[in-house]
Image: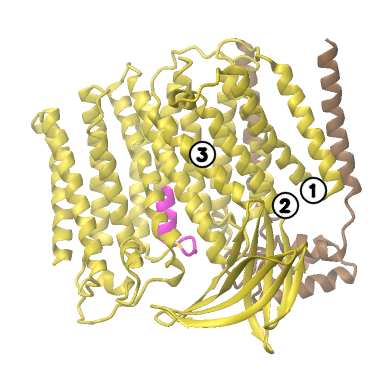
């Protein structure tokens, strides 16, 4: 029943959108009616989505999609998240978010009616393309031709709270760029002279970027504790794909800042707007087509891949074609001095786009090489580390002081403080690492991280009057965001460069020592949970005879899909994580791996700060 | 100005100290070498995991092999060559710098250089 409602709702919303699109040459709908229909269409799409969710929650195995991807024994949260834990459902989620953005955009006031209508019309066209895609190739409402009373189950590795909310957050980011895309194209088509729409673009791009940040962070946090590899970023193609619109979006947000200095690179902003959404669709295509093998590509089906590829070329081609045909004249004068805010922003944009292109090239290069020469190559972490990091370094050096640079002149207020600060930090870090662990990358990362944090604080103290109200926090928002980046850089550097690894073969009752901590292998316990069997080893960690914590690490066995997953046990401390992985058992001894990951918590702290300032930035005009 | 001069001097020397000291600490033992190399090798039976991080049978074998080769006095590039002959370039996470991958390696820095030159010129014009 719910499947039928879902399909009908989706279908009617498609018809409604087709009507909206065709209304343009035929009848002139007033903006009020137009908005109304857009909202109805959004509600219909959401109805469709929630109908599918109902089918999942009630384990309605008459629905083929539910049968294939769910199981009545699953906990409720994974029944809900099962809705988007598969290809069809995730595409329905994609389109639902697309219409949610249209819904909210239809309420925006500071925009003239014609431009708003045009923007929503482009959003409507996107909606039509993707609903056709769903109905023709990936219908989640198909009827199961056999009567069954049990489903096949959800991939156990996806049964995790972090991953349950990861796709909606990530998609909220990806799809948010659709509004900016539509806005930019509409602006081009209307030959918009007024720059008012740039403020709207800034708001929406900050919102999308913030969601994308959250989505990526959730994904990598999940990778950290669920994959059990001790790391949190692997330069996996799927990770790279989410990183590209993130960096391009960051460039967009920064280039939109130039409105404040009344020096607008309009062409460039429009280009970035189109690029961000293109990268988002490109990501969807690569992940969904199954070209990239990864935990994310649920269903490899060539026809779907081709269809998305078609949509990608249509949208991107259309976008860049309009851009070429109608691109605005760059009338604004750009005040490029040796070092003022404009040149800092330009440098930042250049570095970010070069980075994005590098990641793009590295990600698709193996595919290109395989097609041309039929040889398989890998482009992995070492490539990205030795290209992306050096390219980004000048940007990191600059970002600490960029917010206090002037728009007009090349003088930096109180520059001596910054110079002294930089020298002090460098000497301290060098001195410290000379007596501990000497690693050039580690030193570089630490200097950059501390420099960004300290210079941002210096800038706040030297340039603003300290007040404790919301307005003050809005004013220093960019500095806070940069402090977040600095903290994250320290976390990233320490956890990758100064990571320590220990391996043991242990049986019950054994003890071992890591630095000042004694760790006891207490016991092994097994238990039967709702849809899996768990094996856990309890490790008691003591610090000078005081028990710090008991950590459980082990494995789960999911009988439905006959898969074993590793469940890392992690002791989270402010300055380090102690990370346990249980391996194979041989002759009554267990193979245990322990990682000491210093400052991992700083990464998540930094990300949280960035998300905070993303939202604060969106409230600013 | 005296202040500026002093700062420049320190900044320059900072860089020198950095370069010099990183050379001093260059001595590695075999285990470090094994770690460094196997971190850049793909475990062929896993999903996007390095041989160093993986505990699959394949990775354990390769780790042993690499260690043995280092003990025999082979250099890193010799071992890499051996592995590529046996398993194909797919095993290397860091693509070789050869004709096929030239574009991959040159692209990022070339485009950066071009844009930088372009920007400097357009700034100078004004």
Where is A66 relative to B28, above or below?
Answer: below
- Tell me which chain appears yellow: A
Name the element at disc 3: helix
Name the element at disc 2: helix
- Residue placed under numbered mark 3 in the picture: A610
- Left or right: A565, with B58 as reference point: left
* Tag in front: 2 or 3: 3
Q: Distance between the residues labelled 2 and 3?
A: 23 Å
Q: Distance between the residues labelled 1 and 3?
A: 28 Å
Q: Which residue lies furthest to the left in this view?
A: A27
- Left or right: A50, with A241 as reference point: left
- Residue placed under numbered mark 1 in the picture: A439
Q: Are marks 2 and 3 on the same chain?
A: yes
Where is A126 relative to A458, above or below?
Answer: below
Earlier in the chain: of badge 1 and badge 2, it is 1
Where are the magenta residues, as a range? Answer: A282-295
Q: Position of residue B116 (x, y in %)?
A: 64, 26
Earlier in the chain: of badge 1 and badge 3, it is 1
- Residue placed under numbered mark 2 in the picture: A497
* Residue at screen point 58% across, 67% down: A569
* Tag in front: 1 or 3: 3
The quarter of the picture where the C terminus of chain B appears is top right
Q: Distance between the residues labelled 1 and 2?
A: 8 Å
What is the display colour for chain B? brown
């Amino acid at each position: 029943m719910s499947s039928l409602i879902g399909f009908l709702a989706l279908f009617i919303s498609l018809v409604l959108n087709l009507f909206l699109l065709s209304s343009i040459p035929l009848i002139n709908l007033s903006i009020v009616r137009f908005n109304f229909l857009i909202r109805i269409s959004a509600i219909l799409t959401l109805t469709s989505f929630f109908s599918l969710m109902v089918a999942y929650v009630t384990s309605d195995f008459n629905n083929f999609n539910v049968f294939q991807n769910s199981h009545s024994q699953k906990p409720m949260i994974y029944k809900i998240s099962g809705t988007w834990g598969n290809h069809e459902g995730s595409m329905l989620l994609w389109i639902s978010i697309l219409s949610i953005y249209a819904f909210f955009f239809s309420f925006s006031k500071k925009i003239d009616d014609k431009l708003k209508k045009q923007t929503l019309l482009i959003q409507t066209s996107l909606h039509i393309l993707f609903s056709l895609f769903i109905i023709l190739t990936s219908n989640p409402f198909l009827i199961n031709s056999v009567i069954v009373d049990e489903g096949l189950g959800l991939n156990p590795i996806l049964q995790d709270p972090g991953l349950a909310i990861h796709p909606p957050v990530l998609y909220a980011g990806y799809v948010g760029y659709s509004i900016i895309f539509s806005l930019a194209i509409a602006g081009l088509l209307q030959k918009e002279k007024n720059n008012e729409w740039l403020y709207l673009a800034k708001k929406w791009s900050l919102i999308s970027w913030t969601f994308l940040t959250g989505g990526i962070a959730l994904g990598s946090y999940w990778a950290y504790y669920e994959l059990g590899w001790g790391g949190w970023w692997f330069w996996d193609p799927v990770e790279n794909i989410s990183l590209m619109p993130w960096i391009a979006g960051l460039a967009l947000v920064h280039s939109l800042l130039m409105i404040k200095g009344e020096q607008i690179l309009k062409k460039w902003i429009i280009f970035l707007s189109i690029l961000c959404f293109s990268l988002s669709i490109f990501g969807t295509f690569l992940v969904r087509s199954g070209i990239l093998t990864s935990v994310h590509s649920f269903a490899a089906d060539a026809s779907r891949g081709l269809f998305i590829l078609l949509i990608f070329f249509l949208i991107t081609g259309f976008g860049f074609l309009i851009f070429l045909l109608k691109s605005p004249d760059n009338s604004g004068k750009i005040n490029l001095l040796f070092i003022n805010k404009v040149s800092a922003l330009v440098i930042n944009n250049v570095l970010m786009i070069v980075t994005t292109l590098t990641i793009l090239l590295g990600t698709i290069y193996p595919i290109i090489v395989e097609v041309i020469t039929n040889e398989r190559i890998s482009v992995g972490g070492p490539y990205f580390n030795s290209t992306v990091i050096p390219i980004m370094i000048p940007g990191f050096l600059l970002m600490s002081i960029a917010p206090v640079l002037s728009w007009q002149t090349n003088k930096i207020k109180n520059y001596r403080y910054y110079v002294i600060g930089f020298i002090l930090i460098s000497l301290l870090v060098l001195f410290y690492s000379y007596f501990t662990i000497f690693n050039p990358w580690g030193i570089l990362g630490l200097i950059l991280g501390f420099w960004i944090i300290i210079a941002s604080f210096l800038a706040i103290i030297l340039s603003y009057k300290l007040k404790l109200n919301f307005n003050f926090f809005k004013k220093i928002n960019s500095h806070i965001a940069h402090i977040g980046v600095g903290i994250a850089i320290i976390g990233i550097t320490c956890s990758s460069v100064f990571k320590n690894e220990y391996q043991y073969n242990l049986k019950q009752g054994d003890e071992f020592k890591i630095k000042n901590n004694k760790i006891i292998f207490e016991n092994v316990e097994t238990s039967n949970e709702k849809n899996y069997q768990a094996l856990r080893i309890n490790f008691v960690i003591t610090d000078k005879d005081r028990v710090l914590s008991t950590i459980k690490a082990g494995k789960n066995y999911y009988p439905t899909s006959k898969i074993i997953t590793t469940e890392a046990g992690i002791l989270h401390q402010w300055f380090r994580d102690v990370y346990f992985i249980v391996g194979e058992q041989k002759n009554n001894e267990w193979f245990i791996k322990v990682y000491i990951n210093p400052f991992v918590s700083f990464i998540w702290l930094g990300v949280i700060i960035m998300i905070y300032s993303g939202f604060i930035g969106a409230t600013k005009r | 100005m005296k202040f500026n001069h002093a700062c420049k001097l320190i900044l320059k020397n900072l860089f020198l100290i950095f370069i010099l000291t990183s050379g001093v600490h260059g001595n590695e033992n075999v285990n470090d070498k094994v770690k460094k190399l196997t971190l850049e090798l793909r475990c062929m039976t896993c999903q996007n995991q390095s041989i160093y991080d993986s505990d699959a049978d394949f990775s354990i074998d390769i780790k042993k092999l690499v260690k043995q080769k280092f003990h025999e006095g082979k250099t890193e590039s010799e071992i890499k060559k051996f592995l590529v002959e046996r398993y194909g370039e797919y095993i290397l996470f860091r693509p070789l710098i050869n004709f096929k991958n030239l574009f991959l390696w040159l692209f990022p820095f070339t485009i950066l250089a071009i844009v930088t030159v372009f920007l400097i010129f357009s700034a100078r014009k004004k």
